Image: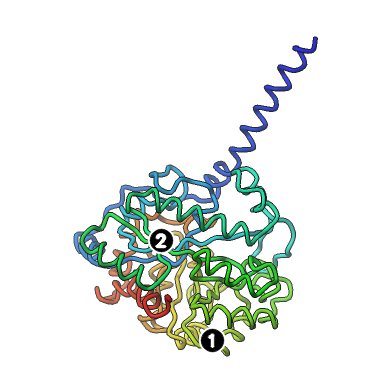
Amino acid sequence: MRKIIVIPALLLLSVLIVSFLAVPALVDGHLNQTRHLGPYTVSERAHALHARLLAADLHADSLVWGRDLLAHGTRGHVDVPRLIEGGVALQVFDVFTKTPWNVDIDRTEDRGDAVTLFALTQGWAPKTWTSLKERAVYQARRLHRMAALSGGRLRVVRRGADLSGYLERRAHDPGMVAGLLSLEGAHVLEGDARNVAVMDQAGYRMIGLAHFFDNEVAGSAHGVSKGGLTPLGREVVGRMEERKILVDLAHASEKTIDDVLAMAKRPVVVSPTGVKGTCDNNRNLSDEQLRRIAGTGGVVGIGFWPTAVCGDDARAIARAIRHAVDVAGVDHVGLGSDFDGAVTTPFDAAGLPVLTEALLGEGFAEDEVARIMGGNVMRVLQQTLP
């Protein structure tokens, strides 16, 4: 009788464990979709140009889903083989450490946390289950481990010398990609400005001040109060600039953007984002904000998903980039795909030449395309990395 009870119980437990562990893959496959899968074909002109330029993308959320980024994946948008296939020279790997279950671009309350589920189901270190700071450190270590196992295909950039050395090697061997770490939301600091140093030591070179909800540092464009920098936030920005960590104003409220631009002494970036000029919603930047961000010497990274560009193809992305260039100047616009950010994109990382073709179709000269596709991001990093 005891065996009759125990065996079904063990089977049920096994099914529950397998189902629990499958959650990240199921969610990843459902949320991170590609409208048109490769192989991708472009004109000879676009192909030749794309092979010459240094493509750089300011935003991909690929680390959180637990994939082996060294293997060619069957879900999501980014892994090292697809980055190399798409000619991506540098990919910013962004880490979000907390996100409410129900997010809305107009109003999101700080309730619930989906990342806790990812931490549990993927077997993250127990200290990550309750600490946002430890989640960031853990994800940084994952990227460094993958780089160590990549055979030179993935190199993590932390300093200017890293970037210069990598670019010299890549000039002779394009079969490699550089990764740079970024954080989405300063709630990762857990209310302590001293934790900027912890993020610096972990290898993070960009920090977004807010994500989908207001935090102790800054107001979010999607939050409840939508306030500006708090006193702690001003201290955080100062410490970031001292340590040469770029401030990312993606998701920041209007007041936060104003406060940061009033005190910034270094270039700032915004990624991922769209522009109100082609897609007017609370997620995107106004023309005045574009001009002021360009005034710092920074770069705005245009996203690839419908909320950012009000379209579902490369032409919509190119139109948004055209507007941003017309307002901010061609030296201050780049790419901020939001690959693997719970969005549907027209193509994955392997399909980036499709955007080169769309930019040519939008009337950009080849040298302008090269700056937009990555040259501007490389310039800012060369100017700002320690």
Give the distance between the C-alpha atoms of the residues marked 1 and 2, in whole angstroms.
26 Å
Residue indicated by mark 2: 156
Q: Residues within 10 Å of mark 1 (few under 14, many from 20)?
A: some
Q: How many marks?
A: 2
Residue indicated by mark 1: 264
- Amino acid type of the residue tagged 2 in the rendering: Val
> Disc 1 or disc 2, which is closer to the eye?
2
Q: Is residue 256 left or right of residue 274?
A: right
Q: Residues within 10 Å of mark 2 (few under 14, many from 20)?
A: many
Quarter holding the N terminus is top right
Quarter holding the C terminus is bottom left
Front-lying residue, 371 or 380: 380
Give the quadrant of residue 251: bottom right
Relative height, residue 311 to residue 153 (above, below): below
Please state the horizontal and vertical placement of residue 360, each as a whole percent of the image: 28, 69
Relative height, residue 53 to residue 21 (above, below): below
Front-lying residue, 308 or 28: 28
Please state the horizontal and vertical placement of residue 263, each as a whole percent of the image: 57, 89
Please state the horizontal and vertical placement of residue 226, each as a whole percent of the image: 69, 76
Please state the horizontal and vertical placement of residue 260, each as a whole percent of the image: 58, 84
Question: Which residue is at 54% across, 60% downward?
Answer: 95
Question: Which residue is at 48% across, 67% downward?
Answer: 309
Relative height, residue 35 to residue 6 (above, below): below
Where disc 1 sits, the SS reads: loop
Front-lying residue, 174 or 162: 162
